Amino acid sequence: MQTRLKNLQSLLYRLITAPSGVAEGLSAERDLSAGGLDAIVLGDDRLSAEARVDIYANMYFYRIRDALKEDFPATLAFLGDDNFHNLVTGYLLEYPPTEPSISDCGRYLADYLSDHPLREGAPFVADLAKLERAVVEVFVGPDDAALEPDSLRAIPAEDWPAMKLRIHPAAHILALEWRVSELLRAVEEGNPWKPAERGAVKVIVWWRNARVFYRDLERAEAEALDAASCGSTFAEICEVVAANVDDEDPVAAMNRLLARWLADGLLVRG
């Protein structure tokens, strides 16, 4: 009985997820038992067995599409509903879901957009999708206690140079070619938005108190956080900041950045 149930579940999954629809999926099922699908799924005068399975197939696609709409609101806003629908159709053909959680469905959408024809009219759309996907991943990312100011003050001054720091494991640093942060923020806040401008930028995405935040990084901060992500010592991070500030005093810059990182909950002990 268990084997028969597993075979039935596998068959229905193949039909529901068949790229070209249930009918074509049925034609590929060479080992279907006598009576075909009618022997497995009960049909009636209103709906055949195939039509009933087709309902689930449509529900499967539209549920994933709607989930991707929620995860990529700015990509949806810029492309429009029809283009986004067609994008998801092609995307799922090339990247069918492989994980139980629906939150994983959009993992490769930015990669899919990297050489998609839609980029001709929206060259920044892959970076936009990459940022939106990072927001999702940070929200469900690993938990860890952030370094608090009081904990840092309790460390003896002589131990600070060798103290190892790293960024929170849920945080992401993205290297982008387009400045898409403001576009995403405008869509999220319901404000008018405009196409992103070209310009290399690093963006940090992190969470604090169950909320996800993101912002563009200045050069010194980006280099310093890259160093922190490798588990550098405090002294090494200070050297990185000093090498990348322009007119600001390096000590003042380090104090400013450290205060911001602590307020954001970006650091943990290495």
Image (spheres, rainbow, N blue to C red):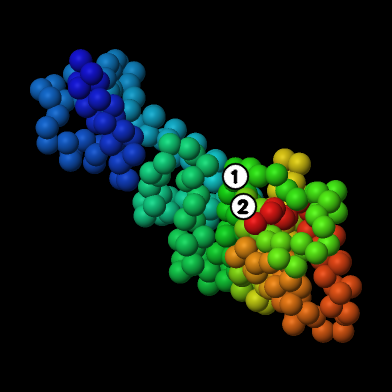
Left or right: residue 167 versus residue 25 is right
With respect to residue 103, does 216 lie above or below?
A: below
Helix, strand or loop for disc 1: loop
**Residue 270 seen in this snapshot:** yes
Left or right, 30 with reference to 213: left
> Looking at the image, which residue is at 74% across and 82% down?
243
Residue 255 percent across, percent down from the top left:
86, 67
Whether residue 37 is situated above or below residue 184 in the rendered picture = above
Q: Does the CB distance between marks 2 and 1 fall below 8 Å?
A: yes
**Residue 169, labelled with which disc?**
2
Question: Where is mark 1, residue-wise?
Answer: 142
Q: Secondary structure at mark 2?
A: loop
Is 152 situated above or below 218?
Answer: above
Provide residue 266's location: percent of width, then percent of height. 73, 55
Residue type at tag 1? Pro
Between 14 and 236, the one lying in front of the other is 236
Q: Nearer the viewer, residue 38 or 198?
A: 198
Of the numbered discs in the image, which one, if any, rests on residue 115? none
Q: Is residue 245 left or right of 229 when viewed as pictured?
A: right
Taking the image as drawn, is residue 222 in sight?
no
Mark 2 is surrounded, within 10 Å at the Cα level, by few (under 14), some (14 to 19) or many (20 or more) other residues, namely some
Quadrant that contains the C terminus: bottom right
Q: Residue 72, position in %: x, y?
A: 60, 51
